């Protein structure tokens, strides 16, 4: 490929992005009372939000429905062609329909109008033309029209679908805030992903506990300390006093440093060589917070203690890596 061909590709890509950026910027001044009314209708919807669109608009409709559902507004996608052949049965009087059509004349969507009007279903129209069959029949119309498409023939839906998608995001996020939808609620709808794990999983869900906790007393000899640390395969042992309270930890890294600096280590006791006042977390701490502490202090394991400083468990970075929190 010669330099001239390369430059043509670069210029075309830049022009596409410029056209789509201009289309998005134009939407900002269209956020008006119609937008507010649409959000209010959706907020007070007692059923589900049914998003419909044909072709490329249908793909955008699916994404908007997915975004609404994941942010606290139950939504589904209805294929308009399937709708007029039986799938309208999924639409109830309590639902709200969002119809996306750049022309406002999409035949498959227009065919849905008699049913929607007959049953009094609220209709929000996202269209590129202010005067069309759909906009006349909609309860609220949001203008998502664009000056031009990004394709050189001004035909392929590009800037128009970008504009519709962005407006759908604006609606979804506005609803999210109006509902008081927080990170914890978001995580409930994303339990399988890394986001959900970071917002839901607590230290108690992943910590080693019971017989799996490496623990020695302050007066334990070095051989007992090493055995406790290595037998549990966590590279760390907790050290407790006579009242079973956490007073320190000893890690494999501490052992290596001790071997470098001491000639006779086996006469030492845990209380002499342990790291005092170690970092620790409570069992109800978010696992993601435990990761943050480990990263900040360059450590790979944390004791888990209760309010009285009794050892309840050990949480290790490797376990957090395995389950995808990190």
Image (cartoon, helix red, strand yellow):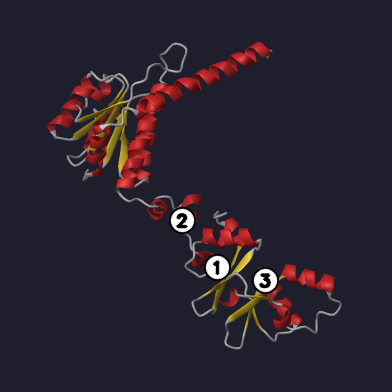
Quarter occupied by the C terminus? bottom right
Q: Position of residue 237 (x, y in %)?
A: 66, 74
Callout 3 crowding tier (Cα within 10 Å): few <14, some 14–19, many ≥20:
many
Q: Is mark 2 on a helix, strand or loop?
A: helix
Q: Residue furthest bottom?
A: 242
Q: Can residue 318 be seen in this view?
A: no
Q: Position of residue 156 (x, y in %)?
A: 42, 17
The correct choice, above or below, for 77 with respect to 5 in the image is below
Question: Label 1, label 2: how many angstroms apart (C-alpha)?
Answer: 16 Å
Quarter occupied by the N terminus? top right
Q: Mark 1 points at which residue?
A: 207
Q: Which residue lies furthest to the front in this view?
A: 29
Callout 1 crowding tier (Cα within 10 Å): few <14, some 14–19, many ≥20:
many
Residue at x 18%, y 31% (from the top left corner): 116
Q: Which of marks 2 and 3 is nearer the N terminus?
A: 2
Quarter holding residue 171: top left
Q: Which of marks 1 and 2 is nearer the N terminus?
A: 2
Q: Where is residue 20 in the image (x, y as percent from the top left)?
A: 44, 23
Q: Which residue lies furthest to the left in this view?
A: 118
Q: Do labels 1 and 2 touch, CB within 8 Å? A: no
Mark linked to residue 236: 3
Residue at x 45%, y 20% (from the top left corner): 19
Q: Do labels 2 and 3 touch, CB within 8 Å? A: no
Q: Mark 2 points at which residue?
A: 199
Q: How many labels does the image show?
A: 3
Q: Can residue 259 be seen in this view?
A: yes
Q: Earlier in the sequence, mark 3 or mark 1?
A: 1
The correct choice, above or below, for 171 with respect to 298 in the image is above
Question: Label 2, label 3: how many angstroms apart (C-alpha)?
Answer: 27 Å
The correct choice, above or below, for 264 with respect to 179 in the image is below
Task: Choose mark 1 or mark 2, whichever is in front.
Answer: 2
Quarter holding residue 254: bottom right
């Amino acid at each position: 490929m010669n330099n001239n061909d390369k430059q043509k590709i670069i210029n075309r890509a830049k022009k596409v992005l410029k056209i789509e950026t201009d289309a998005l910027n134009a939407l900002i001044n269209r956020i008006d009372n119609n937008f507010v009314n649409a959000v209010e209708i959706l907020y007070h919807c007692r059923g589900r939000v049914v998003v419909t669109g044909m072709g490329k608009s249908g793909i955008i409709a699916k994404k908007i429905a997915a975004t609404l559902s994941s942010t606290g507004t139950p939504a589904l996608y209805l294929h308009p062609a399937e709708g007029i052949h039986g799938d309208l049965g999924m639409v109830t009087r309590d639902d709200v329909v969002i119809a996306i059509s750049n022309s406002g004349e999409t035949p498959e969507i227009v065919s849905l109008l008699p049913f929607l009007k007959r049953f009094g279903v609220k209709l929000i129209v996202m269209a590129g033309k202010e005067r069309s069959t759909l906009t006349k029949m909609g309860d609220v119309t949001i203008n998502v029209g664009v000056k031009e498409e990004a394709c050189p023939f001004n035909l392929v839906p590009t800037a128009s679908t970008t504009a519709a998608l962005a407006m759908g995001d604006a609606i979804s996020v506005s609803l999210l805030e109006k509902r008081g939808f927080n990170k914890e609620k978001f995580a409930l709808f994303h339990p399988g992903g890394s986001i959900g794990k970071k917002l839901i999983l607590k230290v108690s869900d992943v910590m080693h506990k019971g017989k799996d906790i490496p623990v020695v007393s302050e007066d334990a000899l070095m051989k007992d300390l090493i055995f406790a640390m290595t037998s549990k395969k966590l590279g760390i042992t907790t050290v407790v006093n006579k009242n079973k309270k956490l007073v320190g930890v000893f890690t494999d890294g501490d052992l290596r440093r001790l071997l470098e600096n001491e000639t006779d280590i086996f006469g030492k006791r845990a209380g002499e060589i342990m790291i005092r006042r170690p970092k620790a977390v409570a069992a109800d701490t978010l696992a993601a917070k435990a990761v943050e502490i480990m990263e900040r202090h360059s450590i790979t394991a944390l004791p888990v203690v209760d309010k009285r400083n009794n050892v309840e468990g050990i949480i290790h970075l490797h376990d957090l890596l395995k389950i995808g929190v990190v």
